[in-house]
Amino acid sequence: MLAAATGSEPTLDKAPGRIRVEADLPEDLPSITRTAVLTALARAPRYGHDRTTGGDIVWAELDREVEQ
């Protein structure tokens, strides 16, 4: 959903118990795109926004089952 909303290829960071999906935000964010991004983020248990020197990113963390 984040890829479709932002038009960028998301990156995945997998760790025990969670998967984090990060996507770059376009500089020009029309209201329909903003709505799509917020809708995608709202589906995740944890989400956020980071501002970096390279631009803005949004991220969502999804829980995953831990094998025992």
Image: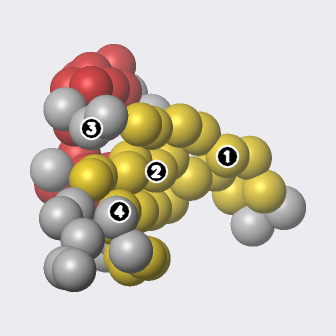
- How far across and down, in percent of the image, does residue 35 sit? 26, 22
- Number of numbered labels in the structure image: 4
In three-dimensional space, the C-alpha distance between marks 4 and 2, rounded to whole angstroms, equals: 12 Å
Mark 4 Cα-neighbour bin, 10 Å: few <14, some 14–19, many ≥20: some
Secondary-structure class at tag 4: strand
The answer to whether 19 appears left or right of 58 in the picture is left
Give the image's coloring scheme: secondary structure
Label 4: which residue? 18
Secondary-structure class at tag 1: strand
* Residue at point 84%, 61% (across, down): 53
Do the numbered discs 4 and 1 sit on residues whose CB atoms are within 8 Å? no
Q: Amino acid at mark 4?
A: Arg
Q: Is 32 rendered above or below residue 22?
A: above
Do the numbered discs 4 and 2 sit on residues whose CB atoms are within 8 Å? no
Task: Please identify the quarter of the rendering in which residue 16 is found.
Answer: bottom left
Label 2: which residue? 59
Mark 1 Cα-neighbour bin, 10 Å: few <14, some 14–19, many ≥20: few
Q: Is 37 rendered above or below residue 62?
A: above
Secondary-structure class at tag 3: loop
In three-dimensional space, the C-alpha distance between marks 3 and 1, rounded to whole angstroms, equals: 16 Å
Nearer to us: label 4 or label 1: 4
Quadrant position of the C terminus in the picture: bottom left
Task: Please identify the quarter of the rendering in which residue 67 is found.
Answer: bottom left
Label 3: which residue? 44
In three-dimensional space, the C-alpha distance between marks 1 and 2, rounded to whole angstroms, equals: 8 Å
- How far across and down, in percent of the image, does residue 62 sit? 28, 52
Do the numbered discs 1 and 2 sit on residues whose CB atoms are within 8 Å? yes
Work out whether residue 6 can be spotted: yes
Q: Amino acid at mark 2?
A: Trp
* Residue at point 46%, 50% (across, down): 59
* Residue at point 43%, 76% (across, down): 15
Among the two numbered marks 3 and 2 on one chain, the one whose residue lies closer to the N terminus: 3
